[in-house]
Image: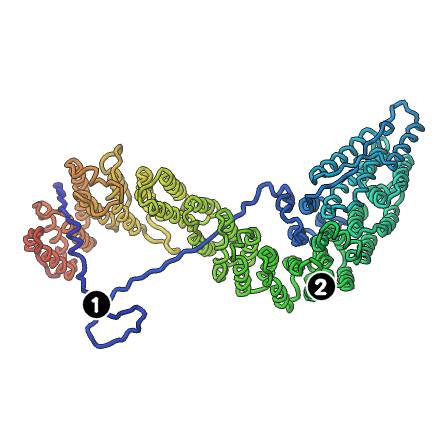
Amino acid sequence: MAAFPWHARSRNYASESEMCKLESVPLDFGDYHPLKPITVTESKTKKMNRKGSTSSTSSSSSSSMMDPLSSVLDGTDPLSLFAAAADPVATTATMDGTRRKRDKDDSSAVGSDFEPWSSKRGEILARYTTTEKLSINLYMGSEKGKATTTGSAVSEKVRTRLEELDDLEEGSQKELLNLTQQDYMNRIEELNQSLKDAWSSDQKVKALKIVIQCSKLLSDTTVIQFYPSKFVLITDILDTFGKLVYERILSMCADNRVSLPDNFSPESVNDTAKETCLNWFFKIASIRELIPRFYVEAAILKCNKFLSKTGISECLPRLTAMIRGIGDPLVAVYARAYLCRVGMEVAPQLKESLNKNFFDFLLTFKQIHGDTVQNQLVGQRVEMPLYLTLYSPAIDWILQCIAYHAPEVLLTEMMERCKKLGNNALLLNSVMSAFRAEFIAARSMDFIAMIKECDESGFPKHLLFRSLGLNLALADPPENDRLQILNEAWKVITKLKNPQDYINCAEVWVEYTCRHFTKREVNTVLADVIKHMTPDRAFEDAYPQLQSIIQKVITYIYDFSLLFSVEKFLPFLDMFQKESVRVEVCKCIMESFINALTLEDEKRMLAALINGFIKMVSFGRDFEQQLSFYVEARSMFCNLEPVLVQLIHSVNQLAMETRKVMKGNHSRKTAAFVRACVAFCFITIPSLSSIFTRLNLYLHSGQVALANQCLSQADAFFKAAVSLVPEVPKMISVDGKMRPSDAFLLEFLCNFFSTLLVVPDHPEQGVLFLVRGLLNVIQDYTWEDNSDDKVRIYTNVLHLLSAMTQEAYIYHVDKVDSNDALYGGDSKFLAEINKLCETVIAQILDHLKTLGKEETLKRQSQLALYFFNTIVAHGDLRNNKLNQLSVNLWNLAQKHGFADTKTMVKTLEYIKRQSQQPEMSHFADLALRLPLQSRT
């Protein structure tokens, strides 16, 4: 077949566009107003166009990045605890992280569910601090106190040690005054080290002197607000001493280097070890002052195991009775706490002694309000609320020991005793903190009644409701009481004026609300939190609590659609205005739904919901933070293809927003940023499984790259799309059904051709390298035998190539020079286009020939008319060969009677109308050569 040279007609797109515009009709609005009622009358109708659009986007997220070192501190971050100093709320803070462990059942005496004293140590030291000056007595020692030489006689050694003990009573000490808190702590640490050094150098009496001296410090309350921390520091030394003594005696029991088993009996202890043990108790019994004698004996309480089976059970009541001789109620309660410490360690089964210890405390509790204590507080300028918080660590510990695996009847007894004491708030709070959550929840209404009537004495009622709420977060109250409990609690909470007091309490009760009520009640609570925390931007100081509320809400409202139907949920998110916190909150929300991804339908549903959320997240002008959020989301949802697709679209949109802000003139920084966006898309698209999703995203992302002047990146996207076309399967799944892919491929390629018009040629790749590559792929693609899509694609290629020959293209990308600017109508460039056109026309005509069989004549007719219309629209019909080709195609379309007569008539009418234009007059001759044939 002879080649048909292609001659595209010159186009004046501006004039064509003007001709195609609809006729404009002047419109007189008069007194028209869009809100005015419309009156219908029988008159000539005027068309009105009303335009209006509103849009708003609002979203926020956060995060307090979890400090990677925080876990090492076991919840006792010294900085945060320091900030909580003298704050009553801290008396209930320990419940949050430890109640769950305590509420587990364990058959052992003291199991892992028992919170050890060591976990409370750091919190106490951080909270109870002082800026006042402190004093301490240091043991100075003497020459006589040095260890005897190896050759010394035993009698001399005994005499020397007795003299050393007398020296302590005679005042061989040095008082250090005006110490800062840190200096004091350093001195205590020095004493602890001196104790170890003395022990290791066999100066046992010196070690005892140091312990006695340190114990005496616990009778000093001159800086009363520091007393709990002093107790922690001193009892560390006592614990060290008790361990050293016990291990020393235990080592003496070893027989032929075989040590005693853990559950040894006194009968297996040799006489030497027993005598040594007795000597220690005799030495301690000779201490004159009550407080050091009590503490040192309590420190070695475990050593009674070497003497008799009943030694510990006999000593505990006696030591409990000794505490009655301590006049200062604060000193006494910490002595009771230390006795509970050692008692739980060595004999946790002896609960009667521990209970007696606490009941003794209750009998003397009224001393707190006596004249002696009041005078002391006045002298030190300490208010009663602060003074009461000093009791919290001791009372909480005592009650924790008593309540551990205690029967429910003990709680009833404790409640009765609290009532007799006027429902003291401090005691009531400690009781709720100590006992099992199930016990507290079952008596919720009783506790509420006690809270209402309690004597606050500096301990606010809202903290009692907070402690009650912590229990109800772990155990359910009776169903009939649940609403009344919430109402009673929230009456108190909502009246709080201080934002920190409010949020610390509201945070706890949100969980209770989510557990037992509908989204209506949750919405009401969230609205109340917004109301309290928005004024003066109080939310900025409460991000941890607000994050906790979000976590609780999404834990219980796990239906994503239900969650976002809670009216105040998104306004609540708006309070997270710190960027890092916002990211963390969004991450938390999305993570809560990851584990639910199982069935395909469920995945699709959740992906749609997550996509809705992603589209609402906005960091304003902080585009880098926005991109970071998308990167994190990609890593979290890599198994959800719809989410990845949404993220690619969102990142492309982010790049275009950057372009809009910069008005197309990128700086070095924004140019690098949009390249990062382009890179995000380029590396994400290959992970998608749907081939047409990949094709369309390559095209879309390439368009975005082109718009941002990222030419090499745009080429990379378009090349990837071209290389992917051969992989398109013949059949694809659409809505669960298998369908031919030809129509989808045709649609994609037509869109691709429209983009390729404005893509400039790469200087090293040759003329129209992308178009040539795509044509090669189309040629090699295996099409269905009954499909004409290949010819339709080739016809669309002619549309593209015709547009490429114009002096000025119909559209451009701002600040990107297309081939019309690069080549400027160069004859070589036009010649290359014409060669491609000839090749394409030859392919079309070859295909038309193959359709000459009877069963394909209808397809031949349709394609001939389709090609004819292309030539009329884009070809220069003043060229004789092209003109004759068009006439042949017209006749071929009608030859076998398959042409639609109406279509043919309308086409001919169009040609005649076009011939009336000056530049299209040659269409008149063409019309005369196009006969209309009737069907035969």
Q: Residue furthest front?
A: 379
Q: Is residue 625 left or right of residue 465?
A: left
Q: Is residue 681 left or right of residue 256?
A: left
10 Å crowding of disc 2: few (<14), some (14-19), many (20+): many
Secondary structure beneath label 1? loop
> Residue at image x 38%, y 47%?
654
At label 1, the amino acid type is: Asp
Work out which quarter of the rendered image holds the C terminus and state it: bottom left
Q: Which residue is mark 2?
A: 454
Q: How many marks?
A: 2
Given the image, on which type of amino acid does mark 2 rest?
Cys
Q: How has the structure been colored for display?
A: rainbow
Judging depth in this view, the residue of 529 and 260 nearest the camera is 529
Label whose residue precedes the other's in the sequence (2 or 1): 1
Residue annotated with mark 1: 28
Where 140 falls versus 493 (above or below)? above
Residue 283 in the image: above or below residue 554: above
Q: Secondary structure at mark 2?
A: loop
User: In the image, residue 445 lies at what x, y percent?
Assistant: 68, 66
Name the image quarter holding residue 680: top left
